Image (tube, helix red, strand yellow):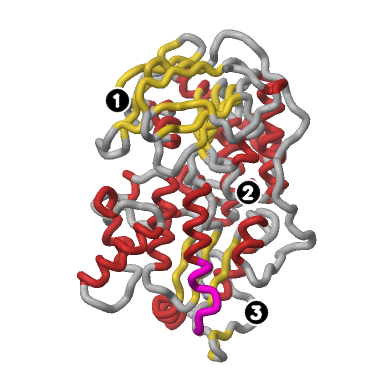
Amino acid sequence: MGESGCGKTSAVLGALDALPAGLRRAAGRVRWNGVPVPAGRAARLWRRAHVGLLGQDPSADLHPLRTVAGLVAEGRAGGSRREQAEAADRVLRGLGLDPRMLSRRRPHELSGGQARRVALARAVVGDPDLLVLDEPTSGLDPATLELVVGILDGRRGRPGRATIVITHDRAFAERVADTVAVVGDAPPERSGPLRSVPVVPARGEPVLELRSLSVGAPGGGPLLLEGVDLAVPPGGFVALVGPSGSGKSTLLRTLAGLHPPASGSAAVSGSPLPERVEDRPRGLLRAVQFVGQDPAGALHPSHRLGTALARPARVLLGEPRGRALERAASLAAEVGLPPDALARTPGGLSGGQRQRAAIARALAAEPRVLLADEVTSALDAHSARTVLDLLDALRAERGLAVLLATHDRAVAARADLVLAVDPERRALVPDPLVPVPAERRAGR
């Protein structure tokens, strides 16, 4: 455990000799059952024989052209193809996924939570000697989190089995760990509501309006949400909660112009929102910004962060290069990134830093609507509070409207309105599990 960017992931990958390009194991020795862990090609063979690894970014772990069945089965070395397929089916069902529905899908046809569970299934299907999980609960609903806890409980105490978990979730760590090692100077904060002084949003005509909007699953699947009507006022904050795969991310991607709706329409400040992002004029491109679950995929791997953050101001706001770079530095500081991060490429940032960078880039366009999908999932409590406090300030000062999908009830509790996906009715309904203070109820 430790704050975002403190080196948790790098320390573990260094022990496995699996560091990304640009990093190296500078000193020290690592032993497995008393035998030194080799370096280079020998280390890769050792990892393949002994280690199951789940990284922070499921999309990076899953080959985009492989099917779910093939991806999970390849995590189990040995045995016939039938035995591998049967093992893949068992572990997918154990994580709450239906192999009949998902086996032939590819990663881009999965929700963020489904992709994370498929990547986890691939890591555990071979019952590895050493299981390494990096932020395994990010983007998971409470029911799926219990399934993950069950998998870890099943490994505890078994001879020849060990597990390392990297997490910001102290409550999860306290449930599953025998030992907690803290990276950095200060212990991580205990879990609790991420609440600051309430901000009362401004009233007014809706900034974002959904009219009888229906969305289907990626790849031409069944309807997930049907006939959604929703109005978000200036400064309003609406949180979406519900099971993984229920349609929260798909709804946000539809509004971002990345997934076609089945029917219905959306508007921003009264202007119809074209279905495809390619058809949107510059004004609407600026007005609606989306931060997805995969910040690594959203940032150009060869562009330095300063360049990435300055680009929206230059392209969408028409600002000169010097002013755009000044705004980039200011936004980076506001989301809690260190000054030297501006000179790094995404590969030189931690998972939490990449997530904050993606948020900063979206805010650089000065949008009217921010669509945010699990934007605090990879952040420690302090960093999450910093980001949410910034959004509260922008809501109050500029009337920014926020539509956010989350599995974190503490994050949802900061919203004016919390809506839960009802899969049976394919509808959004008020969520009774997140009490919203009266002074924060707006946009109902």
Q: Residue at x 70, y 22 (%)?
A: 438
Magenta residues, as a range?
152-159
The answer to whether residue 113 is left or right of residue 353 is left
Between residue 126 and residue 106, name the one nearer to us: 126
Q: Earlier in the sequence, mark 2 or mark 3?
A: 3
Point out residue 124 in the picture as x, y percentages from the top left corner: 42, 67
Q: Which residue is mark 3?
A: 27
Q: Earlier in the sequence, mark 1 or mark 3?
A: 3
Residue 65 in sight from this viewpoint: no
Point out residue 165 in the picture as x, y percentages from the top left corner: 57, 65
Q: Residue at x 52, y 32 (%)?
A: 240
Disc 1 is placed on an element classified as: loop
Q: Nearer the viewer, mark 1 or mark 3?
A: 1
Residue 262's disc is: 1
The answer to whether residue 79 is left or right of residue 21 is left
Q: Residue at x 60, y 30 (%)?
A: 364
Q: Nearer the viewer, mark 2 or mark 1?
A: 1
Q: Which residue is mark 2?
A: 379
Three-letter code, disc 3: Ala
Quadrant of the image containing the C terminus: top right
Point out residue 294 in the picture as x, y percentages from the top left corner: 47, 46
